Image (cartoon, grey):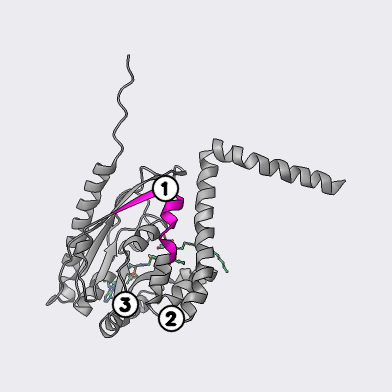
Amino acid sequence: MEVTVGTAALALALLLLPVLYERSGSFRFFCKMGFYNGWILLLALVAIPLCALRGRDVENMKIIRGLMQHVKHLYGIRMVVRGAQHFPPRQPYVVVSNHQSSLDLLGMMEVLPDRCVPIAKRELLYMGAVGVACWLGGIIFIDRKRTHDAISVMAEAAHTMLSQDVRVWVFPEGTRNHSGSMLPFKRGAFHLAVQAQVPVVPIVISSYQHFYSKRERRFTAGQCVIQVLPPLPTRGLGPADVPALTERVRAAMLEAFEALSAELRPTAPPPAPQ
Ligand SMILES: CCCCCCCCCCCCCC(=O)SCCNC(=O)CCNC(=O)[C@H](O)C(C)(C)COP(=O)(O)OP(=O)(O)OC[C@H]1O[C@@H](n2cnc3c(N)ncnc32)[C@H](O)[C@@H]1OP(=O)(O)O
Ligand SMILES: CCCCCCCC/C=C\CCCCCCCC(=O)OC[C@@H](O)COP(=O)(O)O
């Protein structure tokens, strides 16, 4: 008897889920984000055995990129890449991009150059299969609570970039930023570029505000532009030039971000007839 009541309650709950999904924006938002994380976890489980054949190797980022590229279609996000010709063809460089949300992974995987690894917070390593896949992909981990250690990891990365022909992707805001603008930039990426004497390639991912907002629990289909800006050379620059370089790059990115926001902002609906 108890089992029957339990089964009936479960069946009713399952029947109600689609109704709830249809009616409640918040519920839809949590489902979509939950599925996003769950799907990436599943993809990581697929990636691990494929990547393990090579061991920890930046070439594995091609496998991770390939596995991730369909995810935008599941969410109806149309991605347009502009300025891809700005990527220097055959040399190491440091990519810097704005960081709005974990959805940035989709934009990153859309344009991630070959032999390019992100710098990520150490906590990602502990996310089960995702952490293992990231480790196998050669992602560089830093402990944000230990500035000195983070700086020595970056100094090591400067050597690896040159000796093993590796590119590095950094989110210079240092954390996700939902504000619809850009936080001040931390200087690690720019020290890295100057130490390795390689160019900085800024990438701007347009605002998600018109289709995604964590605060408003809104997540619909939408369009996103990923704009690659012209690279800035660092040859001949030293540590003293880093603050000015950081500000120059941030100003260029902010200008592009605002131009894209204005371009993509949905136009107001025409006034209703009187
Ligand atoms: C299929 C499965 C798929 C799985 C998904 C896979 C994809 C996963 C993708 C994951 C994506 C995940 C994405 C993520 O996880 S994003 C989060 C992690 N990323 C970052 O934090 C990167 C940006 N942060 C920085 O660059 C910071 O500066 C660091 C972390 C380095 C230090 O930060 P901290 O806050 O501790 O200190 P500070 O910035 O106040 O700096 C202190 C002083 O040191 C100077 N300084 C800094 N650096 C260097 C240097 N190298 N050489 C010499 N000096 C250096 C600096 O100028 C300053 O001096 P001054 O200027 O005040 O005099
Ligand atoms: C054994 C433990 C199992 C735990 C399982 C957890 C499963 C999680 C599954 C998938 C997570 C997919 C998203 C991973 C990539 C997110 C990258 C990201 O955006 O990191 C945030 C970081 O840039 C800034 O961090 P904060 O904004 O400072 O915070």
Answer yes or no: disc 1 within 8 Å of ligand 2.
no
Residue at x 27%, y 85% (from the top left corner): 163
- Horizontally, residue 99 falls left or right of residue 20, namely left
Residue 212's place in the image compared with 22, above or below, is below
Residue at x 49%, y 71% (from the top left corner): 47
Residue closest to the eye, 5 or 247: 5
Query: Sequence-wise, which precedes: disc 3 or disc 2?
Result: 2
Quadrant of the image for the C terminus? Answer: top left
Which of the two marks, 2 or 1, is nearer to us in this view? 1
Query: Sequence-wise, which precedes: disc 2 or disc 1?
Result: 2
In the image, the segment drawn in magenta is 67-80
- Horizontally, residue 204 falls left or right of residue 136, namely left
Q: Is residue 57 visible?
A: yes
Q: Are marks 3 and 1 in contact (CB under 8 Å)?
A: no
Furthest toward the left, the residue is 236
Furthest toward the right, the residue is 1
Q: Is residue 145 visible?
A: no
